[in-house]
Amino acid sequence: MEETLLKSEALQLAEKNMRAYFASHDIRYIADDAVFRNMGTGETYRGRAEIGAMLHYFYRVAFDARADINSQFIAEEKAMVEGVVRGRHTGEFMGIPATGKEINVPICVTYRLTNGLVQEARIYIMNNVLLRQLGCRL
């Protein structure tokens, strides 16, 4: 019984934290030594500060954007979110100056959790769709 209760508490913490993180991208839900990997570009971000800077740059500097969630799965040690990043291109991104164009880009992120915090994220974003929406010919 005690083991079941502990698992239930761990799941409740993971669900609470991940729902808050999905809504806010607040770095308090990221472990100090977390690693985020963009699987399409190979870029890796390490630690809460570097990850926070990357998220801020993407969602608030390069774009004025948000992630709209279509589906999510949260377990004690894993989570997944699938959705669309929507917004406007407002700053330099991948060498492309701000275009003011709207973006609607599919994204999926898998997470490994430790004690209710994000320990690792693998980001699968459709860079080809994003670049086309910014006016690049591929």
Image (cartoon, rainbow, N blue to C red):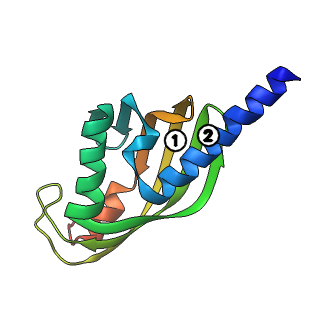
**Residue 42, can we see it?**
no
Local crowd at mark 2 within 10 Å, few (<14), some, or many (≥20)?
Answer: many
Measuring 39% from the left and 56% from the top, which residue is drawn there? 126
Which residue is at the front of the view, 59 or 26?
26
Quarter of the image where one finds residue 39: top left
Measuring 32% from the left and 58% from the top, which residue is drawn there? 128
Residue corresponding to mark 2: 14
Quarter of the image where one finds residue 17: top right
Local crowd at mark 1 within 10 Å, few (<14), some, or many (≥20)?
Answer: many
Give x and y (percent) for residue 33. 36, 26
Q: Secondary structure at mark 1?
A: strand
* Above or below, 117 relative to 71: above
Q: Which quadrant of the figure contains the C terminus?
A: bottom left
Q: Amino acid at mark 1?
A: Thr
* Above or below, 32 relative to 29: above
- Work out whether mark 2 precedes mark 1 in sequence or the reverse, and give the earlier one: 2
Give x and y (percent) for residue 103. 33, 72
**Residue 136, can we see it?**
yes
Which residue is at the front of the view, 4 or 104?
4
Q: Secondary structure at mark 2?
A: helix
Measuring 48% from the left and 46% from the top, which residue is drawn there? 109
Q: Amino acid at mark 2?
A: Ala
Residue corresponding to mark 1: 110
Q: CA distance from mark 2 to mark 1?
A: 14 Å
Q: Which quadrant of the figure contains the N terminus?
A: top right
Label for residue 5? none
- In the rendered structure, the answer to whether residue 18 lies left or right of residue 128 reads right
Give x and y (percent) for residue 43. 27, 37
Q: Nearer the viewer, mark 2 or mark 1?
A: 2
